[in-house]
Image: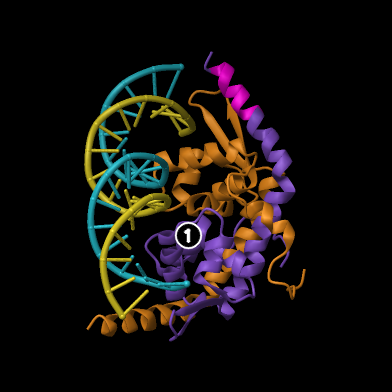
Chain colours: A purple, B orange, C cyan, D yellow
Amino acid sequence: METEQVGRRDEDRDVTRVDSLAREVFAGIANKWALLVINILGERTLRFTELRAEVEGISHKMLTQTLRGLERDGVVRRTVHPTVPPRVEYRLTEAGQALRGTVNGMCAWTRRYLDEIEGARRRFDARRADAAR
Amino acid sequence: METEQVGRRDEDRDVTRVDSLAREVFAGIANKWALLVINILGERTLRFTELRAEVEGISHKMLTQTLRGLERDGVVRRTVHPTVPPRVEYRLTEAGQALRGTVNGMCAWTRRYLDEIEGARRRFDARRADAAR
DNA sequence: CAGCATCCGAAGGGATACTG
DNA sequence: CAGTATCCCTTCGGATGCTG
């Protein structure tokens, strides 16, 4: 999929529309924790605790919440093994797999432009600082 | 770039790491408003008011805030024309352009799987409903 | 181990009013 | 027109404690 010459295509309007299901779904995955979980899962199958250890900084509560949302939208599949202690495993569905490339793109972008961004921030903050003088 | 057999590559660790600049930058763009603004801007140049009209549902305050963040990170370039009334234009920088493909991917994904997701939600909610019975 | 419930402080986000 | 500041309510998100 190449960069188009037109600024935006009409199909994008759906996602842009307020109050539509598309917008709601978009908002559901367009957040830090959801994207990180998708990225970490990749094509592996992980248990709750393993996942929590890999997504650094996420709290127990937020991981639960994020996983429920992704499960509800069919991005993540939850498998319960009725043992003692319980073993619950998470993996991406086909739809979830289809998101991996996009998420990876964002990670790659961050790495690629990190230095540039750091410079931009310094310049921005400097300008603000002496504007406030 | 094909799907790798390994679950995750080591370079991704940077973005995953807590408290690092990479993680902060990632969080900055991995949110609804920032992504929608980037998507709407595309390769066009828009004024504040035009942008506000196109990003449906965004408030004056949130647009300002989002644009400041993107400007600070060098994703968006802000140009002020010292006229009366003032004319301020926004467009994506080269770094911002590099994000378009990714954002578009997320929009495309949403459209592509929307029906499937709707079904998944119904099934999920139904299961929950009679579990609560 | 996994998950739900609760409490509570912090941040998000809308409405309004005021400057250049 | 663009931007800042203020007020105020809502949601986010962490910490803790309790169940199967």
Residue plotted at (55% across, 64% down) = A37
Q: Secondary structure at mark 1?
A: helix
Q: Measured along the vertical axis of the image, is residue A25 above or below residue B79?
A: below
The percent position of residue D12, horizontal first and vertical second, equals 40, 53
The percent position of residue B68, horizontal first and vertical second, equals 53, 36
Q: Tell me, yes or no, if residue B98 can be seen here.
A: no
Image quarter of the N terminus of chain B: bottom right
B85 or A125: nearer the eye?
Answer: A125
Q: Measured along the vertical axis of the image, is residue B50 above or below residue B32?
A: above
Q: Tell me, yes or no, if residue B108 can be seen here.
A: yes
Q: Is residue A100 left or right of residue B27?
A: right
The percent position of residue B34, horizontal first and vertical second, equals 53, 49
Residue plotted at (61% across, 65% down) = A40
Residue plotted at (61% across, 23% down) = A127
Q: Measured along the vertical axis of the image, is residue A13 above or below residue B4?
A: above
- First to last magenta residue range: A123-131
B121 or B77: nearer the eye?
Answer: B121
Q: Measured along the vertical axis of the image, is residue B22 above or below residue A30?
A: above
Image quarter of the C terminus of chain B: bottom left
Q: Chain of mark 1?
A: A
Residue A40 part of the magenta-drawn span: no
Tell me which corner region of the image, top left, top right, bottom left or bottom right, holds residue B25: top right
Q: Is residue B98 left or right of residue A16?
A: right
The percent position of residue B41, horizontal first and vertical second, equals 58, 49
Residue that carries the numbered disc 1 in the rendered image: A16
Task: Residue type at mark 1: give it.
Answer: Thr
Q: Is residue D20 left or right of residue B100?
A: left
B83 or A70: nearer the eye?
Answer: A70
**Circle 1 residues within 10 Å: few <14, some 14–19, many ≥20:** many
Principal secondary structure, stretch drawn in magenta: helix
